[in-house]
Image (cartoon, helix red, strand yellow):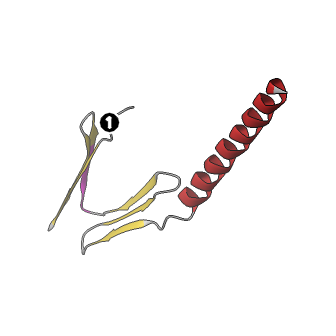
Amino acid sequence: MQTRQLLIFIALSLIAVVAVMAAVSAFRRTEPPVQVQAPAASVDTDKSTGKTTIDAPYAHIEKDNSGTKIEAPGVKIEVPKSPNP
């Protein structure tokens, strides 16, 4: 009887973990994109995929270990690199 209860507990725990993972995945896909608009540069970031698009005709873009820096006339954007877990 205890073995059966243990198996039921394990099965319900696995179902709960899968449900939480599916909910988190669905939530990440519904996040709106981040947009920065300025006269000299446009930066769009899709948070669900992590893809960043930069449209800056007179900009200097520098990417290094500390993050990404964008400098254009009237615009200065610094995006720090996220720490690795």
User: In x, y percent, where is residue 61?
Assistant: 27, 50
For the C terminus, the quadrant is top left
Which range is magenta?
A: 58-62
Q: Secondary structure at mark 1?
A: loop
Instruction: Give the residue type at disc 1.
Output: Pro
| Residue farthest along the front direction in this orientation | 1
Q: Is residue 84 above or below residue 18?
A: above
Residue 33 in percent (x, y) is at: 45, 66
Q: Nearer the viewer, residue 29 or 40?
A: 29
Q: Nearer the viewer, residue 23 or 77?
A: 23
Q: Residue at x 62, y 47 (%)?
A: 21
**Horizontal relation, residue 83 to residue 2: left or right:** left
Check the image and report above or below for 60 versus 7. below
Residue holding disc 1: 83
**Where is the N terminus found, in terms of image quarters?**
top right
Task: Please indicate whether residue 28 sits to the left or right of residue 22 in the image.
Answer: left
The secondary structure that dominates the magenta segment is strand
Q: Is 82 rendered above or below residue 65?
A: below
